[in-house]
Image: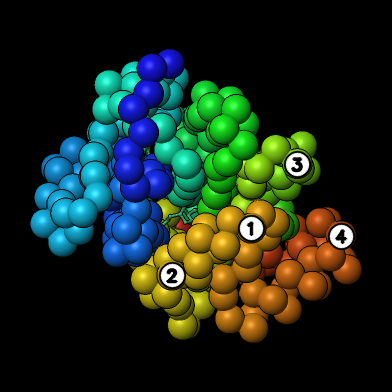
């Protein structure tokens, strides 16, 4: 692939139209990085790129509206990068979605999108963008996981399992890449106030009372990117650290029972033929 390198290092962030992704591209641009943004909402991306270009004109900013659940999205993304003539040094797999509810009450299309965005597109984009990094002996993949990826979570089963995939993938890849100069960083954020859980359909009562600001999490992720370190970065309060330890001590079955009992009380009523 014929690639013109940007004079500033380039970070590509998926799910950059809102929440943590948008906070992270702003933070990276503030630190002098060029940014490539991917998400579905074209209007939001257009506005984001205009904001970045006016605030941080010393670097290059571009966006591409793509639905990562679409099997052609990765091909379109690499075509776009090729046309731009840039190759990202850091790729942040941040796009994500979930849906709270009984497994069978959630439409198949939603389960399919969760797996397509958080599993298939992550593997495909990593496969497409890794070889040039290995050739250059420099690069980094950042995987935005979740505390849900550390345990089975009833009523968020597909979301939690897709994040568990991401956790294992990030750690295994990091080990494979040892000695290549390319890093793999798994980020496990605690609760962030972004509107993600409203979109997911999780009632306010079921969410932690206090969350982190996306800008705070973005700063921690940007620091880790600039340190070029791999491994695991937990960004949260004492709660996330404590449960991280407990999850190593107790098996998944126990967590499934505990999480199931907790979430069951907040389930939306099931109606019509779905009723149990
Ligand atoms: N909020 C939390 O408490 C929390 C905690 C732990 C982990 N996380 C993880 O953090 C990441 C960012 O979430 P957030 O809290 O910032 O929520 P958010 O504001 O809803 O961000 C999700 C991003 O993913 C994009 N996205 C969703 N579906 C997509 C698709 N099919 N194709 C392309 N882009 C898609 C959305 O953009 P479009 O709608 O424009 O496509 C949006 O930019 C997610 O992976 C989430 O699982 C969040």
**Do the CB atoms of the residues marked 1 and 4 lie less than 8 Å apart?**
no
On the question of residue 155 being in view, the answer is: no
Judging by the rendered image, the residue that carries numbered circle 3 is 179
Q: Secondary structure at mark 2?
A: helix
Answer with the quarter of the image where residue 197 lies: bottom left
Q: Position of residue 212 (x, y in %)?
A: 44, 76
Determine the secondary structure under disc 3. loop
Q: What is the C-alpha distance between the residues marked 1 and 4?
A: 29 Å
Quick one: label 1 or label 2, which is nearer the N terminus? 2
Q: Nearer the viewer, mark 3 or mark 4?
A: 3
In this rendering, the label closer to the viewer, 2 or 3: 3
Q: Are marks 1 and 3 in contact (CB under 8 Å)?
A: no
Between the C-alphas of marks 1 and 3, the distance is 13 Å
Residue 209 is left or right of residue 86, and the answer is: right
Tell me residue 152's x, y (percent): 71, 53
Residue matched to label 2: 219
Q: Please rate how many residues cluster around mark 1, counting C-alpha atoms within 10 Å: few if below 14, some from 14 to 19, many from 20.
A: some
Instruction: Give the residue number, with chain letter if any, for mark 1.
Output: 229
> Circle 4 is placed at which residue position?
251
The residue tagged with tag 1: helix, strand or loop?
Answer: loop
Q: Residue at x 51, y 60 (%)?
A: 226
Task: Look at 77% across and 63% down and name the residue there.
Answer: 255
Q: Are marks 1 and 2 in contact (CB under 8 Å)?
A: no
Residue shown at the point (21%, 54%) measured from the top left? 58
Tag 2 near tag 4, CB within 8 Å: no
Circle 4 sits in a helix, a strand or a loop, which is it?
loop
- Disc 2 crowd rating (10 Å Cα; few below 14, some 14-19, many 20+) is some
């Amino acid at each position: 692939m014929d690639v013109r390198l940007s004079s500033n290092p380039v970070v590509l962030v998926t799910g950059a139209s809102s929440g943590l992704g948008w906070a992270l591209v702003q933070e990276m641009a503030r630190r002098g990085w060029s940014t490539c943004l991917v998400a579905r909402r074209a209007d939001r991306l257009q506005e984001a790129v205009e904001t970045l270009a006016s605030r941080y004109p010393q670097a290059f900013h571009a966006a591409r509206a793509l639905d990562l659940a679409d099997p052609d999205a990765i091909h379109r993304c690499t075509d776009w990068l090729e046309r731009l003539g840039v190759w990202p040094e850091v790729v942040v797999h941040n796009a994500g979605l979930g849906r709270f509810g009984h497994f069978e009450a959630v439409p198949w299309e939603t389960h399919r999108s969760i797996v397509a965005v958080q599993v298939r597109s992550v593997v495909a984009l990593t496969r497409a963008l890794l070889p040039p990094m290995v050739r250059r002996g420099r690069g980094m993949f950042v995987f935005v996981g979740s505390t849900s990826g550390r345990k089975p979570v009833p009523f968020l089963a597909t979301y939690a399992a897709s994040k568990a995939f991401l956790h294992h993938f990030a750690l295994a890849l990091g080990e494979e890449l040892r000695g290549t100069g390319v890093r793999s960083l798994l980020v496990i954020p605690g609760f962030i106030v972004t509107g993600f859980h409203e979109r997911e359909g999780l009632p306010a009562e079921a969410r932690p009372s206090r969350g982190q600001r996306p800008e705070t999490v973005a700063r921690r992720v940007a620091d880790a990117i600039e340190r070029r370190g791999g491994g695991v970065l937990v960004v949260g309060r004492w709660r996330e650290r404590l449960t991280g330890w407990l999850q190593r001590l107790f098996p998944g079955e126990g967590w499934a029972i505990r999480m199931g009992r907790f979430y069951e009380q907040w389930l939306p009523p099931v109606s019509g033929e779905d009723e149990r």
